[in-house]
Amino acid sequence: MNTFAPLTPVASGDVSDRGNAPWRALLAPYAQPRLGRSALDLATSVVPYLGLVVAMYFALNVSYLVVLAIAIPASGFLMRTFVIYHDCTHGSLFVSKRANRWVGVALGLLVYSPFVRWRHDHAIHHATSGDLDRRGGGDVRTLTIGEYLALGKRARIGYHLFRNPLIMFGVGPFFSLVIGPRIVARSARPRMRQSVIVTNVALAVAVALLCWFVGWQSFLLIQAPLVLFAGAGGIWLFYVQHQFEDAYWEAGDSWTYVDSALRGSSYMKLPKVLQFFSGNIGLHHIHHLSARIPNYNLQRAHDENPVFHQVPTLSLWDGLRAVNLKLWDEDRRQLVSFAEARRRVAAAAL
């Protein structure tokens, strides 16, 4: 994994600094969606996904092993569809705000997600990523070693379970895609509440019609592996984008938006086929620096500007290993595993 040296120019303060930062002018040419290219994104994500879902239904009469085999590429296209949906929430897929909204709402039904609420929650993630004082806004719960040691036994067990790969990538997809988006807090603003309720009603009608047409058993046999595979892949991508050894975490006035983007968001160099299915989201440093850049311009923005070649770069193997990192060591400024945290605490005690 490549390390990162501070870049210039650097903006400081909160998200509003983006408007005055030189980075905005540097990346402005890439933040121009093209209708034809965006339409191609939809054609190479939604269309093959729906086609493979139909193929899975007919394969039920052949063998469920065939269904599972088809589910692998189908889940890849579903994950790609989610990235296109994600672009809509940032207003980066189309020039028109209305087009981004209505396409996003439609794609939200395919990925089980309420558009307005998810857009709001994800904006909080962009505004607070890497800020120790504002954790919990759409990120993976991460404790410092000191905070972990201050927990009681039950709370430590809960944190261990939450960060366990079997829970995160086994149970997590069903909670993140199916259960969590259905829940609306009582304190939620009316627009957020309406977004969740309307999406839930639309999904209930769609699922009821599909169950009536193909049978509820067939519906579950098809959707379950899709949610598991696509959800696990999506959670892993989201995890490694900010959870790597030399990640960026700062508190108070030390935190800056630009540093959180360029030092706290990784560049995942994936094989081309995985980069396609993940919609270039591995170029996360560019995305966090300018969320208005459509996914298909991220690679060009990185390649054409050597200043970005210094950012934290992860290989596929680095990304897989990063799953073992659980706690933030504030002294050494690194994410560490539970075992490494115990060793460092023991060494400090001696």
Image (cartoon, rainbow, N blue to C red):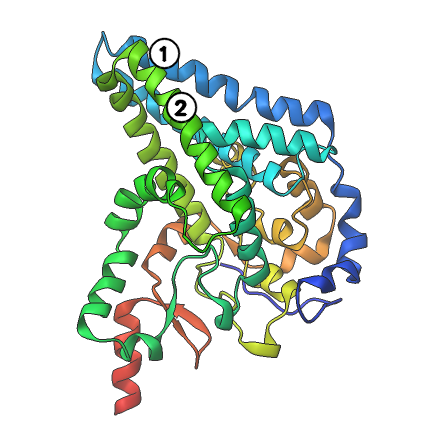
Is residue 55 found left or right of 306 in the rendered image?
A: left
Q: Is residue 210 above or below residue 116?
A: above
Q: CA distance from mark 2 to mark 1?
A: 10 Å
Q: Secondary structure at mark 2?
A: helix
Q: Residue at x 65, y 42 (%)?
A: 298
Q: Position of residue 249 (x, y in %)?
A: 51, 70
Q: Report the front residue among 152 and 329.
A: 152
Task: Choose top left, top right, bottom left or bottom right for residue 220.
Answer: top left
**Can residue 147 be seen here?**
yes
Q: Residue at x 25, y 84 (%)?
A: 346
Image disc number at residue 55: 1
- Point out the tag, 2 or 1, that comes first from the N-terminus: 1
Q: Is residue 216 above or below residue 173?
A: above
Please report contact status of discs 2 and 1: CB closer than 8 Å, yes or no: yes
Image disc number at residue 100: none
**Can residue 269 be seen here?**
no
Task: Choose top left, top right, bottom left or bottom right for residue 227.
Answer: top left
Q: Secondary structure at mark 1?
A: helix
Amino acid residing under circle 1:
Ala
Image disc number at residue 74: 2
Is residue 281 found left or right of 90 in the rendered image?
A: left
Amino acid residing under circle 2:
Ala
Mark 1 closeness class: few <14, some 14–19, many ≥20 residues within 10 Å = some
Q: Position of residue 30 (x, y in %)?
A: 75, 42
